[in-house]
Image (tube, grey):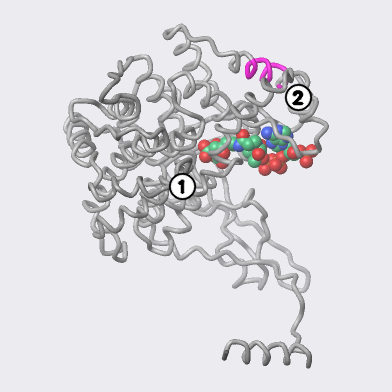
Amino acid sequence: MRLATPTDVATLGIPGQDPRGFQILEGSAGDRAIDMTNLRRQTGLVALDYGYNNTASCESAITYLNGEKGVLLYRGYPVEELAEKSRFVEVAYLLVNGHMPNEKEREDWSMQLNRHALLHEDMRHFFSHFPDGAHPMAMLSAMVVSLSTFYPELSQNQHHVGDEAIDKAAARLLSKLRTIAAFSYKKSIGEPVVYPRHDLRYVANFLNMMFSSPVRPYEIRPEVVKALNVLFIVHADHEQNCSTSAVRLVGSARVNLYAAVAAGICALWGPLHGGANQMVIEMAEEMAAQGMSPKEKIERVKNSKGAELLYGFGHRVYKTYDPRAKIVKKACDDLFRALDVHDPLLDMLRELEERALADDFFRERHLYPNVDFYSGIIYRAIGIPKEMFTVMFALGRLPGWIAHWKEALEDPRFKLQRPRQLYVGPGLRHLAPDEVVRADRAAVLDAR
Ligand code: SDX
């Protein structure tokens, strides 16, 4: 992995201490960082950075994004170009392996994804023990961590696991997560599962497992396959976002890939992160049910002092239009035209976007549509229920999680992640007499 280039030195002046120099590093895209790895050892102080807004947790060669310019590159390729000219399985290979697959690599990859599509039959029975209405993200995380019981070869200390085992686990997980997602949907609607087929490519196989049934053939429309490929591609990675950071942090304890990814799934579930695509549709449905106009909604958000959010808007990094939102919006228009679909919620979202972009409240706060604003409308048009929207996000994000887990494992500086804190609790104190009684009394109670 290429390393950042040492350039100048930043000098930190702390009262009572000699000025200290800290190396400034420059990344391959020109971004710069101050290497604070030895800050505490040199100064006795730690850096406090709520939300890690100003903290780089690692050097990474996977994805570059520029929040001010709205740039997103996967291994150097613009996401716009990949969404238009590539397919999700190739982009997954690119993220995990660092280059686009040649013809032989593409065939091997496709064969591996096919070979690993089935779940162990014992795992299929897990679904029948989840309660009706179980959220698919809970099932997804439970099933993924369970894979480590069926495929224990990655459970040992990761340093001793060769590349071949990791690549096999990557292909296995990419293929099986798609099957788990479809099975969890079938469980939620009480239908029998549909097994993967070797004659169908990745996305078509997923659609067939989701929507075909013994009594109802499903026509796999190329326009739908194209739209899902685009959606999976734009979700495939996004550098150190919340769920990817969870995968890296859990992975730093040297757990196996499945456990680290299960942690990422749980982080993605949150409504401020991957759960936002479901929240956007629920927000629009609530507006429709209450007869609330986009104009009224915008005013409510502005006057709520942060209590009411315009879901699908805003981003921790993008302070301009999320480039993925533009791609998803176009995919939405293309699909609706092809399927001749009309959804009043789409009209509502379009007017919400138009009003928000023209409103100083949003502009002053650099709030623009993010990847979640239009994705749910596409899933709705395909027939995917909103409870599955974040599962769709996880299917797309999986290659990014795997790539970061693998990159971290290969980084010699990648240590157990253990942030520090600034303690503001009570000083040293001892048990008061009546507290000792309580402790003694507790011992007596325990003895009963
Ligand atoms: C994803 O990190 C990634 O890369 C994530 C992701 C990925 O691919 O992995 O891109 C996927 O998670 C996209 C984001 C999806 N989440 C949402 O759509 C939920 C709604 N958005 C907000 O929760 C919010 O915008 C965040 C959390 C996404 C980002 O918020 P920040 O950068 O922490 O900004 P902030 O919370 O400090 O807000 C700044 C101001 C505040 O107002 P003031 O206190 O200055 O008056 O903007 C306001 C906020 O109240 N604000 C919003 C808002 N988002 C921020 N007000 C209304 N609606 C919103 N959506």
Q: Which amino acid does the dot numbered 1 rest on?
A: Ala
Secondary structure of the residue carrying tag 1 is: helix
Which image quarter: residue 413? bottom left
Confirm whether the magenta stretch covers residue 206: no
At a point 65% along the width and 33% down the height, the residue shown is 314
Report which residue position mark 1 lands on. 138
Task: Give the image quarter of residue 155.
Answer: bottom left
Please give the range of residues in magenta.
Answer: 348-356
* Up/down of 363 relative to 4, above or below: above
Viewer-proximal residue among 353 and 134? 134
Q: In this view, does 240 lie to the left or right of 208?
A: right
- N-terminal of the two: label 1 or label 2? 1
| Secondary element type, mark 2 | helix
Q: Residue at the right extreme?
A: 303
Assess disc 2: are there few (<14), some (14-19) or many (≥20) residues with their C-alpha within 10 Å of its C-alpha: many
Image coordinates of residue 123 in percent, x first then y, are 28, 49
Residue 193, percent across and down? Answer: 29, 35
Q: State how far apart marks 1 and 2 are (Cα).
A: 33 Å
Write down the residue under mark 2: 298
Taking the image as four quarters, which one is ligand 1 found in? top right
